[in-house]
Image (tube, grey):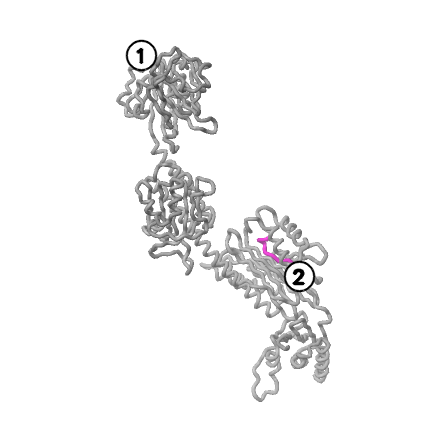
Amino acid sequence: MSPVYPHDDAATARAVVDGSGALTEWNDGARRLLGWSADEVVGKPAAQLLADDEKATVSRQLRTSGMLTLRHRDGRPVSVWLLAHHRPTTADTPEHWLVVSPLEGHGARQPEDPLFHADVVQSPCAVALYDERLRLRRFNRPMADLIGIPEERLRGLRHSEIGGRPESVDTERYMHRVLTTGRGQDVRAYVPSGPEGRKNAWLARMAPITDENGRVRGVCLAVHDFTEQYLAQERLQLVNEASVRVGTTLDVTRTAQELADVCVPALADFVSVDLLDPADTGGDHAVGRLTAPVSLRRAAHRSVNPGNPEAVAKPGQVDVYPSPSPQADSLLAGHTIVASTETGDLAQWLSWDAVRLERIRQYGIHSTMSVPIQARGQTLGVAVLTRFRRPDGFTPDDVLLAEEITARAAVCIDNARRYSRERETALALQRSLLPRSLPRTAAVEAASRYLPAARAGVGGDWFDVIQLSGMRVAMVVGDVVGHGIQASATMGRLRTAVRTLADIDLAPDELLTHLDDLVARLSEEAGGDGSPGEVGATCLYAVYDPVSRRCTVARAGHPAPVMIPPGGPPQEVDLPPGPPLGLGGLPFESVDFALPEGTVLSLYTDGLIETRDRDVDASQALLCEALAAPSGSLEEMCDRVLHQLLPAGGALDDVALLLARTKGLPSSQVATWDIPADPALVAPIRKQVVAQLARWSLSEVAFTAELVVSELVTNAIRYGAHPIRLRLIHDETTLICEVSDTSHTAPHLRRARIFDEGGRGLLLVAQLTQRWGSRHTGDGKTIWAEITLADAM
């Protein structure tokens, strides 16, 4: 600790003693007092300087003083008043003692001395006067009470020697600036008081003392204690910090952890946050009166010690708290309860749990504060704050501060739980609307993935695989604008509409046109005050025929699919983009192209390729790279695509991914006949069908197929337009009979009367087959019927 005036160093006897008791510093003032030079005493035990009958008592207080008899170099005893400052070990300096004793300042006061005339005795503020060498000359009663040592003992010491702290040295430098400039100075100081390290806040106001000629003859130091204002400012700062740090996400556990983090170490040494589990019915919290025992789940905790060794429960663990216990009693009472070992109620509270009681004794926990977590009239849980490193108990101001922070956190926790409940409801709704499993078809092998957005909430993405007539299959991927239950409900309506439109075998562009009209109507229904709502969606619809191995695709504002041909690189299918659904009046275009057997078609929503870290083109390239990598199955390919394209924290938007590997139906499983316009030739056609079924080893369904073919061909000859064609298709489970003609008139079932000679053909077909129907083609229509081979066997 270097003095402000090195040349004035001999006015104070000063020595430094290290933690082992050896002298490490010895100034010229110490030599004047005892006669020993620095070379004679530095490095030797300080106890050698004590008189033979004197014993020094080592204290661990920050400052101590008193009379001590020392041994002069010439052997005579010297009675000296000493002031000692203890300095614990820090990052910069080891433990040591600074010992000082004034050598001057005991002379008579001079009447002409301006410091003698300065009237400070009756001032309510702590005031001290320092001379031109910044050595203490006078101080008043409040300053004596503050320092705790009489004036006559300290007179002649500098401020840095009286205080003995780095803050005292800084104050002395400001005093020197006042002395040299003649201008006053205000300095705020935060000085630790006590072993707990709490700080007292002081405002030191320094002013020059001048004589009759205006010459600066000293410095007046007035000290004001503004610790209460400082603590109030700290409390306000902690509340503001809590409003920023707590509730950064809509995650209950994260919010509880943020509450614990804010309170440690600013308010407590260990904080635990325990929450009531939502009720089994409806997910709401208990609204009625709680009763003991109370079951609480540990959501979070935080300690000043690494690893939280004070914690008895682990995060996620459920404990039952009886009465009495801090948790249960505060929840039942509905207000904060403070307990301490000093009052004895802490041990009484924890008498039910020997483990917790032992933990209190082990770590010296002396105070707890249990604060109920309440929001919107509901009790969510309790936060328990404990102190063991800080020796002071919780004050009423601490209670108010903890309640304010907890109240803010409670609203955030309640918001997070409400959001989680709504998100779970939306997820359940969406899961119920999405296909639970993809159908096994003769046309494609399919795999899918759906991931909800990590933060934005459940959206309206969907996918589907729909079996069509003639072994064909429809694949659809769509995305409703927005998030939440409303988006999921809209998605469900659109998925149902797509399935309905697919059942009537509309072409992809026609299907999207009908879907566009539906979205426009939904927008009108969602609006109000004569203005439309904001319902929008995108969709991609593809139909693949395993017989012709051709695919027809149309899209409405949706990302184009990526095609991976066998042995070839992935490539984006070139499709007209089409307008998003709901704009109305704009056409959609279909594209028809060949798909070799084994081609993988990748359909997805924009959440897969739109991220903050890269643009769409980079995501498309990364998608192609992931699809091009060899894999054993479509399931592995799905996992690889999501792993490579989505960030670690989850997607920003919902993601739907559908992969389909095409299959081809061999020509040996298809038989076709051109039907002449002669009803008399129906019988030979039936015989050819029976013979074909025998070659396919399907004679068990020959009788049923013969009847169905007879009715469908006869109807086509009577009511259709030529040319007429019959086609039989089969796979392992189904036999399909198709009759096509160039008429656009659709057949329908009708109820025949008793004496009618006809009108029962289609009714017979409906009874004999698994399902039947018709579809429009570019040059007419096709009537089809499916016979299930498994049932026939």
Q: Is 326 on the left-hand or right-hand side of 597? A: left
Distance of mark 2 from mark 1, alpha carbons?
Answer: 106 Å
**In-image side of 252 versus 650 (left or right):** left
Circle 2 — which element?
Answer: strand
Q: Residue furthest front?
A: 52
What kind of element bears circle 1?
A: loop
What kind of residue is marked 2? Arg
Q: In this view, does 75 lie above or below 297?
A: above
Q: Can residue 557 be seen in this view?
A: no
- Would residue 603 be counted in the magenta stretch? yes
Q: Which residue is drawn at 30% across and 23% down?
A: 144
The vertical placement of 789 against 189, above or below, is below
Quadrant where the image shows the N terminus? top left
158 or 228: which is nearer to us?
Answer: 158
Residue at the spot of label 1: 107
Q: Give the range drawn in magenta.
A: 600-608
Q: What is the x, y in percent for residue 239?
A: 39, 41
Q: Is residue 586 magenta?
A: no
**Earlier along the polypeptide chain: callout 2 or callout 1?**
1
- Quarter of the image with the C terminus in it: bottom right
Residue found farthest to the left: 122
Q: In this view, does 662 lie to the left or right of 375?
A: right
The spot of residue 597 in percent (x, y) is 70, 63
Query: The disc labelled 1 sits on which kind of residue?
Result: Gly
State the image quarter where residue 194 is shown.
Answer: top left
Q: Where is residue 580 in the image (x, y as percent from the top left)?
A: 58, 58
Q: Which residue, given by chain and number where applicable, does mark 2 sit on?
A: 661
- Residue 393 position by quadrant: top left
Pick the residue in front: 763 or 273: 273
x and y, in percent, of residue 493 in the image: 52, 64
